[in-house]
Amino acid sequence: MKGAYHRLTLKLSGERLAGEGGFGINPAAIADVAKEVNAVHEMGVQVAIVIGGGNIIRGVAASAAGMDRASADYMGMIATIMNALALQDSLEKTGLDTRVLSALEIKEVAEPYVRRRAVRHLEKGRIVIFAGGIGTPYVTTDTAAALRSAEIGSEVLLKGTGVTGVYDDDPRENAAAVRYDKVGYDEVLHKNLRFMDQAAIALCRENHLPIVVFDMNVPGNIRRVAAGESIGTLVSD
Ligand code: UDP
């Protein structure tokens, strides 16, 4: 099977790597993701991954529980680096060549993020894992995914979620919620449809970067989306 894209960014939330109760790192879950990423690579697609940290800590939740927001956010960024190393290990076990590029400097375990270097790695067929978000608090890895996609010239941002796409209401609370096959950025922002941070969506709109929102918990879906199958919701102009 051939890929529908030359270069794509996959936003993987920490939840996808989690063990029991959505917490921690589950080697079996990561191995599944790694296999799918390998299949996408085999399709001739350059793959960059922005990894989340919500399976370990989310700044907003920790600050709601009384912690200083910026400190909690830095912990969240460090969590993404842990996830990135776990994912790197799993990807390499499938035979892929990988690099972790971190927005927070942590030289012993990851390269610092340098845009040109990221592009070079991709051109050489390496899987690039972006860790540490964008390196500043008060945003999430969704914003990092939108920003890095624009910087490295990805044709699409694949946003894996826990539901099958973008709905007109939360499908977990409203059984009558309807899923969009396609929806525009403006409608998403106007109706405040929540599948990603508004800041991230606005960045995608500004850069005409299409987003495919799909259920990342269904095995094979990452491969299907990369092959151009219309599953989930396409968000575009
Ligand atoms: N974070 C941050 N700056 C960034 C990226 C992430 O402060 O550029 C922090 C923020 O606290 C966030 C946490 O890291 O909640 C984990 O990332 P995220 O919530 O995006 O993970 P996901 O939900 O995708 O697993």
Image (cartoon, rainbow, N blue to C red):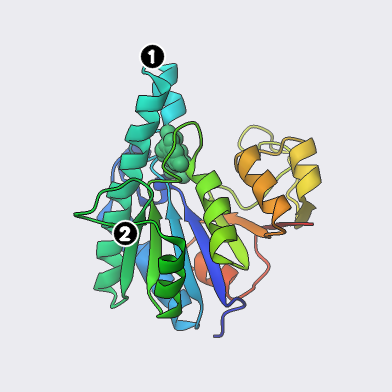
Q: Can residue 217 be spotted in the picture?
A: no
**Front one among 180 and 114:** 114
Q: Can residue 123 be spotted in the picture?
A: yes
Amino acid type for the residue under numbered disc 2: Leu
Residue at (53%, 65%) from the top-left corner? 152
Residue 164 picture location, percent across and down? 61, 53
| Disc 2 from disc 1: Cα separation | 31 Å
- Ligand 1 quadrant in view: top left
Q: Is 221 on the left or on the right of 25, as rendered?
A: right
Q: Is 94 on the left or on the right of 218, as rendered?
A: left
| Residue at numbered disc 1 | 66
**Front one among 165 and 54:** 54
Query: What crowding class fits label 1: few (fewer than 14 Cα within 10 Å), some (14-19), or many (20 or more)?
Result: few
Q: Is residue 70 above or below residue 115?
A: above
Upstream in sequence: badge 2 or badge 1? 1
Query: What crowding class fits label 2: few (fewer than 14 Cα within 10 Å), some (14-19), or many (20 or more)?
Result: many
User: Which quadrant of the figure contains the C terminus?
Assistant: bottom right
Residue 21 picture location, percent across and down? 35, 37
Residue 127 picture location, percent across and down? 39, 70
Q: Is 149 on the left or on the right of 229, as rendered?
A: left
**Front one among 102 and 222:** 102
**Front one among 173 and 52:** 52
Residue at (69%, 56%) from the top-left corner? 207
Residue 19 picture location, percent across and down? 31, 45
Amino acid type for the residue under numbered disc 1: Gly
Kindly identify which numbered label has been placed on residue 87: 2
Residue at (73%, 40%) from the top-left corner? 177
| Label 1 near ligand 1 (CB < 8 Å) | no
Dot 2: element: helix
Q: Is residue 57 above or below residue 178?
A: above
Specify the farthest residue to the left: 108
